[in-house]
Image: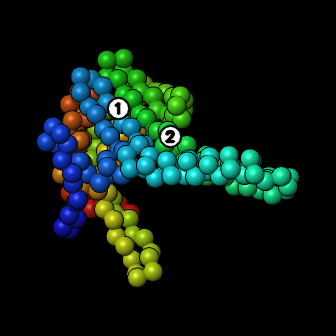
Amino acid sequence: MAERRQRKRKTSQGRTLSMEEVVFGYRVTAEDGKVEVCIGGGCLSLFGMFFLLFGSGVMVFVVRTVSDASTLGTFVTASAVFALIGAVLVFGRYRLKIDAHSRTYRRGCSLLVFFVTKRGSLDEFDEVTLTHEVSVDRVSSGHRVRTFYPIQLSGPQGTLSIASRSSLAQGRTEAKKVAKALNLPLSDRADDEPSE
């Protein structure tokens, strides 16, 4: 199956950014025994800024000009929802931090402050795997087929998802970096029959 063409942008260091990095702020860094995945920011922050400013502006305007209690409550609630959605898009982040030196990982979400939702030991995993998955979505014009290349830590007790890329080349590059940083073997199963 031929790989989709990707729109890419160059950074100031000459590295190309995928659309996932530009739009969703999807970053994976792997070096010196540490791997960090951060999802959030990117262009979604700009989109969220519109919601945040619109919701906040309407709330301030309505509070200052409307005197009817029921109308005030409706507008304040609606604008607060807009502002909350905007705040999550602007400030919200998902993070996964893996430290090969202390043999631990932790993942969580943040909205200005990092909240750990899961901690664990790196000893639960014995390899980094790169696989091939196909997703078929129904759309109005028929079906849309999307191909993903998930990068995971795998072991007898389960798996830990690190990243998922739509480009095989980028998936392989990141899987190699993660395996090298964590000093684990890489099991490249991207050419195997895809799972759905």
Q: Indicate the quadrant containing the N terminus: top left, top right, bottom left or bottom right.
A: bottom left
Determine the image quadrant of residue 135: bottom left
The quarter of the rendered structure image containing the C terminus is: bottom left
Secondary structure beneath label 2: strand
* Amino acid type, mark 2: Gly
Name the one closer to the observer, 106 or 22.
22
User: Residue 86, labelled with which disc?
Assistant: none
Residue farthest to the right, as pictured: 69
Work out which residue is located at the far top of the displayed protein and give it.
102
Q: Position of residue 181 (x, y in %)?
A: 24, 28
Q: Answer with left or right where residue 128 lies relative to residue 58.
A: left
Residue reaching furthest to the bottom:
141
Three-letter residue code for mark 1: Glu
| Rendering coords of residue 17 (x, y %) | 23, 48
Q: Characterize the local packing of mark 2: few (<14), some (14-19) or many (20 or more) Cα atoms within 10 angstroms.
A: some
**Number of numbered discs present?**
2
Front-most of residues 26 and 23 = 23
Which residue corresponds to mark 1?
Answer: 36
Q: Earlier in the sequence, mark 1 or mark 2?
A: 1
Tell me: 171 left or right of 99.
left
Report whether 175 appears left or right of 77. left
The colour style of the image is: rainbow
Q: Secondary structure at mark 1?
A: strand
Q: Residue at x 39, y 70 (%)?
A: 136
Tag 2 residue: 92
Which of labels 1 and 2 is toward the front? 2
Evaluate whether residue 159 shows in this view: no
Q: Residue at x 28, y 43 (%)?
A: 129
Residue at image location 68% in from the left, 50% down from the top? 61
